[in-house]
Every structure is written in structure tokens, then in C-alpha cells.
Amino acid sequence: KNQVEQSPQSLIILEGKNCTLQCNYTVSPFSNLRWYKQDTGRGPVSLTIMTFSENTKSNGRYTATLDADTKQSSLHITASQLSDSASYICVVSGTSGTYKYIFGTGTRLKVLA
Amino acid sequence: DAGVTQSPTHLIKTRGQQVTLRCSPKSGHDTVSWYQQALGQGPQFIFQYYEEEERQRGNFPDRFSGHQFPNYSSELNVNALLLGDSALYLCASSSRDRGGIYGYTFGSGTRLTVV
């Protein structure tokens, strides 16, 4: 069964600290993996998109890594800001051209001053 | 360049009623997907429309139906509303020609509350 699991479920950190969110998937064959940021009550906003051949991709203070062999991805947030408080969702697409993406349940991050 | 637009932003309905949610895709996109997101959960795929036809469907009952218009906009209809239908409904648009990898853009959603 194609699944995407994220950990931790929730995380609280102090402003300025770094953190890393994890995503493990069993989707096969793999096409691409995305990380989204979702503010409460809003639609998800794409942070990074990685295909099979990409190991690392950065978007400002956000850096995503992908290990297609172990089917793991991580999202590292550097020098966190209060505005980073949100849910971070990992989404995996199983086959190139397929339009049904498999969503993780997300990690809820809270950044405290 | 307008992104994905959804309307209304909030909606309150009574059990048993019917509801219609609307989505205008991002300019240049021709494919619309609908998702249901319960509080604290990840989005669940409902269905996808391309060329005015339903192309894929998730595990949702027939009470959930949709439509896509020639201008690529889309509607999601839910009949015989249940309390459990209360959720954030997200619309995402993409371009079929780009293989779906790029430009998969979400709207801000419609918050449906069934009382």
C-alpha cells in the first residue's frame, strides 16, 4: 500500500533554532516528492519539488533532502522564525504523469519567541 | 497572474442539504483536483477533472460529484451533507502538458461546516 509517514507529529522550538522534519514513504514506483507549508485554514504552498535524481534542494532557509534508496526525505529549517509556525506536509507522486498525489498527515511546527 | 481561486471561503450548511464549491484554476492550467482536509489531517484526494471529464477518483461516495467547464473552472457538489463532511476543501490546478510535476498549485480552500 502506498503510504507517506511523517515525524514528528508536532514540534515546538524557539525562534532562531534549527529543526528537521522527516518523511518516509512506501510509494513505488517513485516520481517526485514535494514539501508544502500550510498555514492554518489556508491552502498548502509548495516549498520544494524533488525528482528521483535529486538529493538536495534549497529554498531560502528550507533545505530538503531525498534518499530514494531508503525512501526517506527530510526538511531542514534553519534559523527559524515565528512565521515558520505552520504544518509541513510531505507529498509523494507514484508515477510520472499521475495526478493523484499521496499526502502525509504533516508535522505541526510551532516557533516560540 | 491570478493563482487558484476558490469560493466561497466559508460556508455553513445543515445536515441533509446540498452544497456547491467553486474553483478557478491558475492561468495556463487545465487540470483541477479536489481534496478534503479534515482538521489535523492531511488532504485526501476526492477526484480530478481534465477536458471536462472526471479522470481519477479517490475513495469518496457518489454524494461527491463534480464538473469542469470549458474555461477549466470546476465545481464540487456534495449531496445529503453529513456532519463528517465538515472540512477544508482544497482545489489544486496543474498543467497536463507539464506532466503534473510542476505548477501543482493549491487554492486557499473553502471551509465547510455542517451543523
Image (cartoon, grey):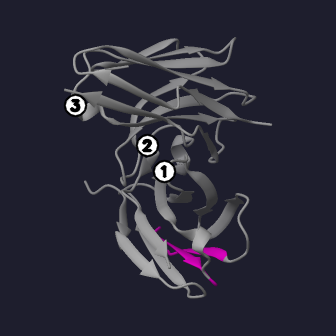
Q: Which residue matches tag 1?
A: B94
Q: Quadrant of residue B82?
A: bottom right
The span picked out in magenta is B64-80
Asked if the magenta segment contains residue A111, the reply would be no
Question: Magenta includes B69?
Answer: yes
For the residue pair B113 and B22, the one nearer the viewer reads as B113
Q: Alpha-carbon neighbours of circle 3 within 10 Å: few (<14), some, or many (≥20)?
A: some
Residue under circle 3? Answer: A82
Mark 2: secondary structure? loop
> Relative to A41, is B67 on the left or the right?
right
Asked if labels 1 and 2 share a chain, the reply is yes
User: In which chain is the residue bearing label 2?
Assistant: B
Say whether residue B24 is visible: no
Percent x, y of residue A91: 56, 36
- For the residues bearing labels 1 and 2, Cβ distance under 8 angstroms: yes
B45 left or right, relative to B25 = right
Q: Which mark is residue A4?
A: none
- Give B11 or A95, whichever is nearer the viewer: B11
| Discs 2 and 3 carry the same chain letter | no
Residue B62: where, in percent of width, then height?
Answer: 73, 75
